[in-house]
Image: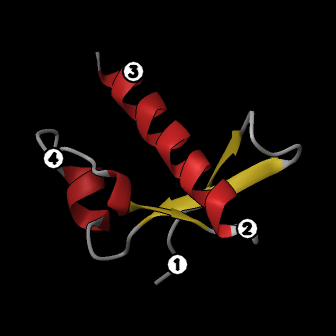
Amino acid sequence: MTLNKFYIKSEHHTEDVAYRFNPNVWHEVTNWKTYKVKVTDIQIVSDLPKDVKMLIRREVFEDILASEQ
């Protein structure tokens, strides 16, 4: 099964960063409108240092929350 990758232009990295949702929650994220995404559901696919990945995961999470309002 191939999961979709998404890309974000981040303030913390110069190139586009690839991310995806954790495969364990993929079905819930894509099919349940009431599912609340958590920061731990987001995986950074691009090869980056751990501290930058954490910053970008938080940035993606905040973008998702902002789009739901």
* Disc 3 target residue: 66
Distance from disc 3 to disc 1, alpha carbons, whole Å, reads 27 Å
Distance from disc 4 to disc 1, alpha carbons, whole Å, reads 22 Å
The single residue placed furthest to the top in the displayed view is: 69
| Residue 51 image point, x, y percent | 64, 60
* Disc 4 target residue: 35
- Specify which label sits upstream in the sequence, 3 or 1: 1
Residue 39 or 8: which is nearer the viewer? 39
Q: Is residue 9 above or below residue 65?
A: below
Amino acid of disc 2: Pro
In screen coordinates, is 10 left or right of 67? right
User: Foreground mark, 1 or 2?
Assistant: 2
Amino acid of disc 1: Thr
* Disc 1 target residue: 2
Label 4–label 1 contact, CB within 8 A: no
Q: Is residue 41 above or below residue 12?
A: below
Q: Quadrant of residue 28?
A: bottom left
Amino acid of disc 3: Ala
| Residue 37 image point, x, y percent | 27, 47
User: Foreground mark, 3 or 1?
Assistant: 3
- Specify which label sits upstream in the sequence, 4 or 1: 1
- Specify which label sits upstream in the sequence, 3 or 2: 2
Label 4–label 2 contact, CB within 8 A: no
Say what secondary structure mark 1 lies in. loop
Q: Residue at x 42, y 40 (%)?
A: 61
User: Foreground mark, 4 or 2?
Assistant: 2
* Disc 2 target residue: 49
Distance from disc 3 to disc 2, alpha carbons, whole Å, reads 26 Å
Q: Residue at x 38, y 70 (%)?
A: 22
Amino acid of disc 4: Tyr
Say what secondary structure mark 3 lies in. helix
